[in-house]
Image: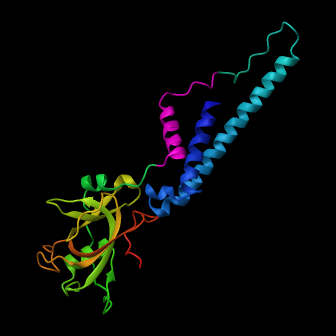
Amino acid sequence: MLQPMLLLLTGAAILRVSLFSDICLRYVKEGLQPFLIASGFVLVCFGLAGALRHGLRFIRRRESTSSAPAGTAPAPDEHDHDHADVPGIAWLLAASALVLLMFAPPALGSYTAARDSPKVVEDYDHFKRLPAQGPVPLSLTEFTARVQQDRAKSLRGRTVVLSGFVTPGKNGTWDVTRLLVACCAADSQSLTVTMHGVPAPPPDTWVKVTGTWHPSGALGTASAALALDVRSLERIPQPLSPYQDRPPTA
């Protein structure tokens, strides 16, 4: 009976973070959520089927015992062997399922970013024309590409708006960071932009910053610094999909 209970527990944990909430987006990319839901349903169905089979076997055993003449031992059941022996490693599965049911770990943050490999931004064929006036919301990916690839120097003197979480930097600076995943949190890579001009908020705080490119290196080339002179900073809640690098909303 323990094996079906482990399946039910694991399936319930998966459904809790993928069907009844969006917690799973802390661990996998958004496109994998339907597959997690389907996996949770399959595990629950297998667990229920196993529990039903064990229940029916128990009922048959009770009936055969009650109908046997007094002093007669019941006929041995060829399937009546010990199903209670669960490999010790299976209890690790139960532990992880209980963690998801009772306390879902947060998304990756500054600790991971400080030890992660940097994300290489692909070359852009062309850049869209920026609005003529006003601050320009950009993803960290597009900001990085425009700073280091746009030979038209479209960010010269322009005010941009970026968002991400705070990562401690070097020499008293700090970074706005995004973690990007190809599949799940295990393959994450980081994008960072160094902030200048304002004190660092606490690590892992999600912020929206407004400022201009920090002039260091040649804009539009690989030597250009990925940095911002901050004019204003606003704390924001963590987005629903923390691993999607999108421009900040108004």
Residue 123 seen by the camera: no
Kindly give the residue lying farthest to the left in the view shown.
217
Give the residues in magenta.
82-104
Q: What residue do we see at 55% from left, 56% from top?
A: 18
Kindly give the residue lying farthest to the top in the view shown.
71
Q: Nearer the viewer, residue 202 or 35?
A: 202
Q: Is residue 68 left or right of residue 130?
A: right
Q: Is residue 176 left or right of residue 43?
A: left
Kindly give the residue lying farthest to the front in the view shown.
199
Looking at the image, is 90 positioned above or below residue 212? above
Looking at the image, is 177 positioned above or below residue 153? above
Q: What residue do we see at 74% from left, 16% from top?
A: 76
Looking at the image, is 249 positioned above or below residue 67? below
| 143 is within the stretch colored magenta | no
Q: Is residue 242 left or right of residue 58?
A: left
Which quarter of the picture shows residue 210?
bottom left
Q: What residue do we see at 30% from left, 53% from top?
A: 112
Q: Nearer the viewer, residue 48 or 168?
A: 168
Q: Is residue 72 left or right of residue 182?
A: right
Q: Position of residue 139 (x, y in %)?
A: 33, 74
- Of the 4 image quadrants, the one containing the N terminus is top right
Q: Position of residue 123 (x, y in %)?
A: 25, 75
Q: Position of residue 120 (x, y in %)?
A: 25, 66
How many labels, in total?
0
| 83 is within the stretch colored magenta | yes
Q: Nearer the viewer, residue 137 or 243?
A: 137
Residue 208 seen by the camera: yes
Colour theme: rainbow
